[in-house]
């Protein structure tokens, strides 16, 4: 299975996607959409929208999706089995207030 995940370096939703990949021991390409403008542009072009995370699994783009939704897609399509390693972070939650404060201290401008 080829997986490309368009993620922010620090984000509750992005960390949820990473947690699902770890839970099922899946190799995936973690694509930084914050520090690399071209990666963000590729995500928008492929997904047709600007929100993240987006995860491409064997050519199927799952746009603006949580880790929980990624796992549900993979289970429904028999790409993974139920079970796996215990989760260490929420898979369907945004950033905490602390994470937002840390990100606000380092604004990213690529427009």
Image: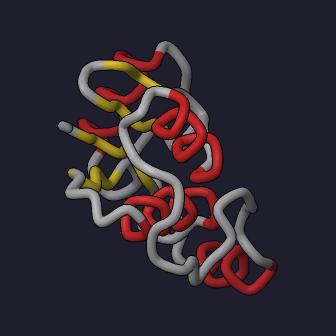
Q: Quadrant of residue 96?
A: bottom right
> In this rendering, is residue 1 above or below 61?
below
Quadrant of the frame with the N terminus:
top left
Total labels: the figure holds 0
Colouring scheme applied when the structure was drawn: secondary structure
Q: Is residue 47 left or right of residue 31?
A: right
Residue at the right extreme of this rendering: 97
Residue 82: x %, y % from top left: 52, 54
Question: Which residue is more in the foreground, 97 or 69?
Answer: 69
| Residue in the foreground of this view, choosing between 98 and 20 | 20
Give the residue at x 26% y 20%.
59
Question: Residue 52 appears in which quarter of the rendering?
Answer: top right
Residue 15 x/y as whole percent: 52, 67
| Closer to the camera in the image, 51 or 27 | 27
Between residues 34 and 65, which one lies in front from this camera angle? 65
Is 38 drawn above or below residue 95 in the view shown?
above
Q: Residue at x 60, y 74 (%)?
A: 103
In the shown orientation, is residue 63 left or right of residue 79? Answer: right
Quadrant placement of the C terminus = top left
111 vs 4, left or right, is right
Quadrant assignment, res 44 = top left
Point 20% across, 57% down: residue: 27
Residue at 48% over, 61% down: 20
- Give x and y (percent) for residue 101: 71, 81
């Amino acid at each position: 299975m080829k997986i490309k995940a368009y993620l922010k370096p620090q984000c509750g939703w992005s960390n949820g996607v990473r947690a699902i990949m770890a839970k099922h021991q899946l190799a995936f390409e973690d694509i930084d959409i914050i520090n690399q403008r071209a990666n963000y542009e590729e995500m928008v072009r492929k997904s047709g929208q600007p929100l993240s995370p987006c995860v491409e699994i064997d050519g199927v783009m799952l746009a603006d999706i949580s880790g929980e939704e990624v796992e549900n897609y993979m289970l429904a399509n028999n790409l993974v089995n139920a079970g796996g390693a215990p989760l260490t972070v929420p898979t369907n939650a945004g950033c905490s207030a602390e994470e937002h404060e840390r990100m606000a201290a380092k604004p990213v401008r690529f427009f």
